[in-house]
Amino acid sequence: MEPEKSIALRPKFEVESKNSVDKILEKAKQLKTELKADYQIKIIDEHLYFYFSKEKRKYYSPFLHLELEANEDKTTVKGLFGPEQLLWTLFMFLHFIIAGLFLVFAMMAYTHWSLKQSTVLDFSIMGIMVVFWFSLYFMARLNRERGVPQMHELEDLMNKVLE
């Protein structure tokens, strides 16, 4: 997988494994105890979550979520790389605040326009909100680029589990 070339902030992928779901879960449980110092592995039903240990974790460190789906003779593995949940929640909160302010000032601009008043301040603030929105996106891209080496580490860990 090449997350460097992906536009999405949370890249998704899908792979096939010859092993059964139970065999993959057993391998994950085994690696969970072996690699406890470097990684945290959470197993919930047929979902696997791979995190870095607190010592190796940075604010931009990704996590990997795998969903296992059993087929006749193979297992379909759907994966999702994402930022730390707290960081993603803050990121989405800021997006909603910026979008809300943009809409409020758009309504105010329409009201001022229909009352034949000046709309310069309203459109200026709307422009600033657009600049903030693009800034948030590019900051998120920068953080994802910083986390790409760790994404490859998590991908290697996933490949060990799927072997």
Image (cartoon, grey):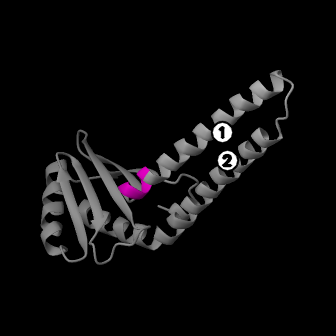
Q: What residue is at 16 percent from the left and 62 percent from the top? A: 27
Whether pointer 1 and pointer 2 mark residues with C-beta atoms closer than 8 Å, the reply is yes
Q: What residue is at 53 percent from the left and 68 percent from the top? A: 145
The magenta region covers 85-89
Q: What residue is at 78 percent from the left and 40 percent from the top? A: 123
Q: Secondary structure at mark 1?
A: helix
Task: Look at the image and say whether residue 148 sits in the magenta stretch.
Answer: no
Q: Along the horizontal axis of the image, is 33 left or right of 96?
A: left
Residue type marked 2: Met
Q: Along the horizontal axis of the image, is 51 left or right of 96?
A: left
Observer-nearest of 139 and 51: 139
Q: Secondary structure at mark 2?
A: helix
Residue type marked 1: Phe
Q: What residue is at 22 percent from the left and 62 percent from the top? A: 41
Q: Which residue is mark 1?
A: 102
Q: Which residue is mark 2?
A: 129
Across and down, in percent, residue 137 comes to 60, 55
Q: Which mark is residue 86?
A: none
Q: Quadrant of residue 149?
A: bottom left
Up/down of 138 relative to 145, above or below: above
Q: Quadrant of residue 37?
A: bottom left
Across and down, in percent, residue 92 comes to 48, 47
Near mark 2 (Cα within 10 A), the count class, few <14, some 14-19 or many ≥20, is many
Across and down, in percent, residue 128 comes to 71, 50
Across and down, in percent, residue 108 comes to 71, 31
Mark 1 and mark 2 lie on one chain; the one further toward the N terminus is 1
Report, in whole angstroms, how far the alpha carbon at label 1 lies from the one at label 2: 6 Å
